[in-house]
Image (tube, rainbow, N blue to C red):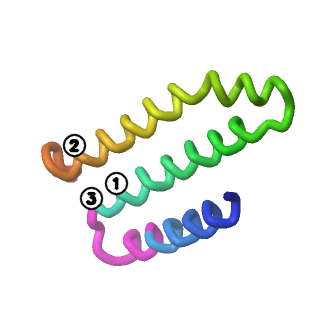
Amino acid sequence: MATPILLAYSIILVALCVLDLTAKIIAAFFCLILIANFLNFAGMMAILRNVPTEEGHRLKANTTPYMWVMCALYAGVLLISIFWLRPVCQDG
């Protein structure tokens, strides 16, 4: 799982640099940073859920509700930002 996350981080970093040096599209910055934060969460959950001990099995069982709630919250933020509160930058 580390290789796809690292590849995605690299693509996001290049995209953020391109956006910073060209057109400053606030919604694109928001989406890229949201995706990067979700990847960080997914990496943390992959580490927590793959501890190869008995405590790891309990940890996996105990963090399952947290994982689903956080996935729902990330989806909620994305849906709200697309359909209701669009990310904008205003002077003042």
Of circles 1 and 2, which is in front?
A: 2
Q: Are marks 3 and 1 in contact (CB under 8 Å)?
A: yes
Q: Nearer the viewer, residue 34 or 55?
A: 55
Position of 9 compared to 16: left or right?
right
Residue located beneath label 1 in the image: 30
Residue drawn at 57 percent across, 63 percent down:
9
Q: Position of residue 34 (x, y in %)?
A: 41, 50
Separation of residues labelled 3 and 2 (CA atoms): 12 Å
Residue drawn at 52 percent across, 27 percent down:
66
Separation of residues labelled 1 and 2 (CA atoms): 12 Å
Q: Nearer the viewer, residue 31 or 54?
A: 54
What is the three-letter code of the residue carrying label 3?
Ala
Callout 2: SS: helix
Residue located beneath label 3 in the image: 27
Q: Quadrant of the N terminus?
A: bottom right
Mark 1 or mark 2, earlier in chain:
1
Q: How many marks are shown on the rendered structure?
A: 3
Residue located beneath label 2 in the image: 80
View extreme (right): residue: 53
Residue drawn at 38 percent across, 41 percent down:
74
Q: Quadrant of the C terminus?
A: top left
Q: Residues within 10 Å of mark 1 (few under 14, many from 20)?
A: some
Q: Residues within 10 Å of mark 3 (few under 14, many from 20)?
A: some
Position of 57 compared to 92: left or right?
right
Q: Position of residue 91 (x, y in %)?
A: 16, 50
Q: Nearer the viewer, residue 17 or 36?
A: 36
Most prominent secondary structure in the magenta stretch? helix
What is the three-letter code of the residue carrying label 2?
Ile
What is the three-letter code of the residue carrying label 1?
Phe
Q: Which residues are magenta?
A: 16-27
